[in-house]
């Protein structure tokens, strides 16, 4: 039974991930593209994340900047639909999201020293955002930038899908940064 559940979950995740590049291209240039991607990655039909935050670290300019954040307990039920076709309503909600605002207002000196973003720095950042059990991926982005994807799971049920989560998080690198 558990194996059947994981196979179905893997199928759902791969379907979401395979559709995402087309969705990103369909709304090319939207300011909040990263928020839409985070929504899909956090959805219960994908990785079922409690909170997720995306940052870009630019060592050349010594800057770490928050791009987008999503806290699934904050999101009203009517926004757990296809946000790609209702992007204006979702965008309006996200402009007022407390967690998203906290992430987007975050700016500090670069964490990328010696080519490593350390778990101690991530823990401090997570504590400031109210992420209680943080996990993270560091992503190599274009132009020498680095992505930082910090997340908290609702449960450990989907840890076997970590490889897919890192691939999904890398799609954030295709989102414009405003």
Image (cartoon, grey):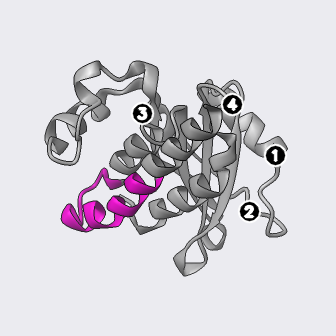
Instruction: Name the residue carrying label 1.
Output: 119
Cα distance in 3D space between marks 4 and 1? 19 Å
- Percent x, y of residue 91: 23, 39
**Secondary element at tag 4:** loop
Sequence-wise, which precedes: disc 2 or disc 4?
2
The residues tagged by marks 3 and 2 sit, at their Cα atoms, a distance apart of: 23 Å
- Badge 3 marks a residue whose secondary structure is helix
Earlier residue among tags 2 and 1: 2
> Could you tell me which residue is drawn at 44 percent across and 35 percent down?
70
Q: Does the residue at mark 2 contact the one at mark 4 (Cβ under 8 Å)?
A: no
Q: Earlier in the sequence, mark 1 or mark 3?
A: 3
Secondary structure at badge 2 equals: loop
Magenta stretch: give its range: 14-33
What is the CA distance from the residue labelled 1 to the residue labelled 3? 23 Å
x and y percentages locating residue 84 in the rendered image: 22, 48
Whichever of labels 3 and 2 marks the residue nearer the N terminus, that label is: 3
C-alpha gap between disc 2 and disc 1? 12 Å
Circles 2, 1 touching at the beta carbon (< 8 Å): no
Q: From the top left corner, tell me how far across and down residue 99 is, in percent.
A: 46, 28
| Quarter where residue 33 is shown | bottom left
Observer-side mark, 2 or 1, equals 1
Q: Which residue position holds label 4?
A: 156
């Amino acid at each position: 039974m558990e194996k059947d559940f994981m196979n179905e979950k893997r199928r759902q995740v791969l379907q979401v991930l395979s559709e995402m590049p087309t969705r990103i291209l369909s709304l090319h240039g939207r300011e909040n593209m990263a928020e839409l991607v985070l929504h899909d990655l956090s959805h219960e039909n994908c990785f079922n994340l409690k909170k997720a935050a995306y940052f870009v670290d630019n060592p050349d300019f010594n800057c770490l900047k928050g791009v987008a954040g999503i806290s699934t307990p904050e999101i009203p039920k009517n926004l757990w639909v296809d946000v790609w076709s209702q992007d204006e309503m979702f965008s309006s909600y996200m402009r007022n999201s407390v967690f998203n605002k906290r992430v987007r207002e975050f700016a500090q000196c670069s964490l990328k020293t010696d080519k490593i973003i350390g778990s101690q720095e991530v823990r401090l950042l997570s504590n400031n955002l109210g992420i209680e059990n943080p996990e993270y991926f560091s992503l190599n982005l274009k132009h020498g930038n680095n992505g930082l994807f910090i997340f908290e799971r609702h449960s450990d049920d989907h840890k076997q899908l970590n490889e897919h989560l890192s691939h999904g998080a890398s799609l954030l690198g295709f989102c414009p940064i405003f």
